[in-house]
Amino acid sequence: MASSTLFQSSPFSLNTNTKPYSLPISTKPIHFTVKSQSQSQPQPLTQNNTPTPSPSPSSKLRRPADENIRDEARRKNVSQHLFSAKYVPFNADPSSTESYSLDEIVYRSQSGDLLDVQHDLTALKKFDGAYWRNLFDSRVGKTTWPYGSGVWSKKEWVLPEIDDDDIVSAFEGNSNLFWAERFGKQFLGMNELWVKHCGISHTGSFKDLGMTVLVSQVNRLRKMNRPVVGVGCASTGDTSAALSAYCASAGIPSIVFLPANRISIAQLVQPIANGAFVLSIDTDFDGCMQLIREVTAELPIYLANSLNSLRLEGQKTAAIEILQQFDWQVPDWVIVPGGNLGNIYAFYKGFQMCKELGLVDRIPRLVCAQAANANPLYLYFKSGWKEFKPVRAQTTFASAIQIGDPVSIDRAVHALRSCNGIVEEATEEELMDAMAQADSTGMFTCPHTGVALTALFKLRNSGVIKPTDRTVVVSTAHGLKFTQSKIEYHSKGIKDLACQFANPPMQVKADFGSVMDVLSKYLQSKAPRYH
Amino acid sequence: MASSTLFQSSPFSLNTNTKPYSLPISTKPIHFTVKSQSQSQPQPLTQNNTPTPSPSPSSKLRRPADENIRDEARRKNVSQHLFSAKYVPFNADPSSTESYSLDEIVYRSQSGDLLDVQHDLTALKKFDGAYWRNLFDSRVGKTTWPYGSGVWSKKEWVLPEIDDDDIVSAFEGNSNLFWAERFGKQFLGMNELWVKHCGISHTGSFKDLGMTVLVSQVNRLRKMNRPVVGVGCASTGDTSAALSAYCASAGIPSIVFLPANRISIAQLVQPIANGAFVLSIDTDFDGCMQLIREVTAELPIYLANSLNSLRLEGQKTAAIEILQQFDWQVPDWVIVPGGNLGNIYAFYKGFQMCKELGLVDRIPRLVCAQAANANPLYLYFKSGWKEFKPVRAQTTFASAIQIGDPVSIDRAVHALRSCNGIVEEATEEELMDAMAQADSTGMFTCPHTGVALTALFKLRNSGVIKPTDRTVVVSTAHGLKFTQSKIEYHSKGIKDLACQFANPPMQVKADFGSVMDVLSKYLQSKAPRYH
């Protein structure tokens, strides 16, 4: 392996030549000479461009004791940026020239529309797909700042112009792409069912992926002396948790508005523990949202709500990561739970960039899965995309997608229409049963994953998804955030639900005979040949 | 990248030559020719040993639709095992010849001592350190069965003789090695403080690492028609969760004994959701343990308790993974919370194997951190290893290490004496404060991590650990499992604790003026130059 002094933390730190194929420098210590037919592999080059030998472990130079990984990145970074990105109105007319620097604080276009982060694809295309695949692969699993993160290992596609030094990262991403072998076989007759466990993460949900990008950009703005004294959000759950954690990590004040008496301990505890300034306000969620909009118009607080387009740049890396984990083979279907609908667009954008930049030759079909209690996109899809009507969202166990008037509706429709996508819905009984079924095969899923799994059940039953289709279900949060609803389910304590897969504990007296009786019966039922 | 037909899922599937340096075959598609001075790099070889070209994405052969990753591994696996392992009495006299096949069901030696899984180091040493480093590195971040797992990517060192097909894996391991930048700088003046987040995992604790090994071996035994109708444990928490999840994944009955009315919802919900047969028994934890010992002596239930030496083989991979994530540089200190004391030995064993097999040239000093309420190892250490006395463990927030008479005491003492290790302790106030301090810098830690962080505070204060020492704190569970104790802390609701880092929410009326007042004051305190 290379010593730390021999490899470069920035792929563009030594060579200023921008011609394609000439300058890639690996972040990973690879000590092979490069085959001529494989020009676009990242090449390990020393200052004089000769391949480096592999030092023996004892001769390895360790990073100096007073230098941390951020210092190391700083020392090596020449801060030369070949790539750039800017805000543009989402799906703007080609003739539109409206755009904003990412260093501006702007949430919506002049006409009030959503913004999109637009990358300079011409610059990115100077490198071919194999180059990007190998660059991204070379960064997996190390602690090199900031590429140990699954998000920042795709930095050139996320925030290409930010200094490594400004990045606020918890080494997020690189989440488990889990082969749901037993669930697929037992319940769906499928060989190739996978669950992308985005919730097995630092704060327990996929929101980390977007928040590292937003808070990093805020950190940069603050260093540029822009008037940002803190970051605020109104959220009952995962967003406030992720915001608080990343702000805490950077020492940036975070402000969270929560409706008093309407949220659970589990929803409250993360922002509190992460040192956020938590205002418990005597109103409902919409009231909190209204107040934070008014307040951020008066005070220099950056608003981290769900229309923010920076967050989607981080979230899209989960799609790239799925392709990478499949060794750049493309799955047939990806199913994403949808509420405010930013994430389904983020997945589309990640896949689409991989296709456009030659990493893969097609993209998967996307399925957006909604709770029937909050299904405006589903109704819109069923109408043949004729007329969109917000709905009044009813209570759902899938609380993070309980949204009747989704901010990112236009983004979602664009994504789904572009990939021949589908929208499905799940009733409360369906989603809780699907969650319990998944858990019974060794997962520990959240209700949103139950929504996505229900969509899969329906599309398998209707034959749209075939037994051999390689399918990825996106799990958005860790089941540990939903222990209360699981307990209610398994104690059959939910009104109007049969809870048919409940598995309550059995009460037994503390004596050997009683325990043996109960166990023998159970084991007989499991292994009839025994006895 | 290689097509799936070009690379081998087993490093030993083609070449039967056992000479060192001659047969390494990569699992990862690398398309470089190998430099002559780097003989021990894994080489990508086709059937006729010529380097493979890099196919364009469109020409990549995808695994056939009816073949899953397990089928693929089966097709490619010639099942030739160069390595082996067996049970031997722990720290046996060199003259002892007592040993057992791993396919026997045996928990203790003839004399009632602990067992240890002993690997054939002579066979492993036929390959040099660089070979192993590169082999392990080549397996990171892919879904190739079973190497996508952080445990099974080290299969040759774990259970070398198990068929890939028998393995029960959730792609565990590969957990986040988090740079605790702000915590290290703010509270300890340290540049190089890292937290190995073993709890950001499938079941939310490090127990996954060991349980994948135990359940895989049980799966193998059942396929060999050994009389194992299920796996049982008596555990109040993480062990039963991990056991249930892995058994569910394999369709093996799991049986969990829990003391009725003494455990929390969060502790109960995982085995229930994962389909375990949960007996809620009207006794305490010791009573459950006694009963399951009696029952498993009568019924063919494999006992998954903490003296099981198979589990340590999985847990030791976390140590190897730390070295790997540091690019095979060795940290100075690794701090591990200790209760039953298997894990501290597992870390030692992982590090020691890496040294013995030439992957690194030294091992870190280990610190075992105990709760003061359950500190028998600490007292033993303080006595100069003179006399070990079990203690009666008092209640501690660090519930998983509330153990007064640790099963693995001999293993721990051997580990600590061999690496010049240290034992520290943490009071309830210290551990809860340390947890809150860590959380305030963006983590979301468990009380056990609080114990380890307290040990670090003390060793920094005494100057034993220096500001520039590279130090890893092992976090054993996800904070989401401990939301209740965090809420109690932040609401200052814990008797005899000052809860000095509590951050309770602020109640505010739902009107613009009230919110502005509160926020302006807060922001002024945070950014005095504003206004």
Image (tube, coloured by chain):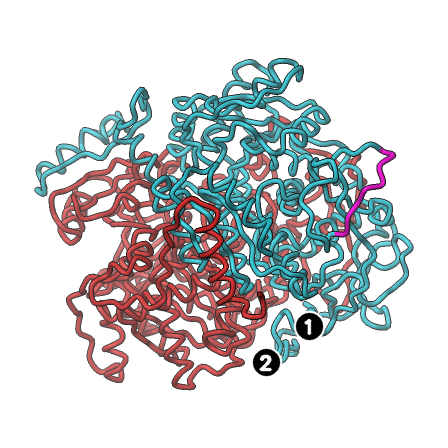
Chain colours: A red, B cyan
Indicate the amino acid at tag 2: Ala
Q: Is B343 drawn above or below residue B119 in the view shown?
A: above
The residue under label 1 is which amino acid type? Ser
The verdict on residue B100 being magenta is yes
Q: Position of residue B47 (x, y in %)?
A: 83, 72
Local crowd size for mark 2, using a 10 Å CA cut-off: few (<14), some (14–19), many (≥20)? few
Closest to the observer, A496 or A16? A496
Of A149 and A282, the residue lying toward us: A282
Q: Is residue A26 magenta?
A: no
On screen, residue B235 versus residue B307, left or right, reads left
Q: Is residue B529 left or right of residue B181?
A: left
Quadrant showing the C terminus of chain B: top left
* Magenta residues (range): B94-101
B205 over B375 or under it: above or below: below
Image location of residue B375, percent across then percent down = 52, 23
Identify the residue under disc 2. B65
The chain containing the residue under callout 1 comes to B
Q: Nearer the viewer, residue A270 or B290?
A: B290
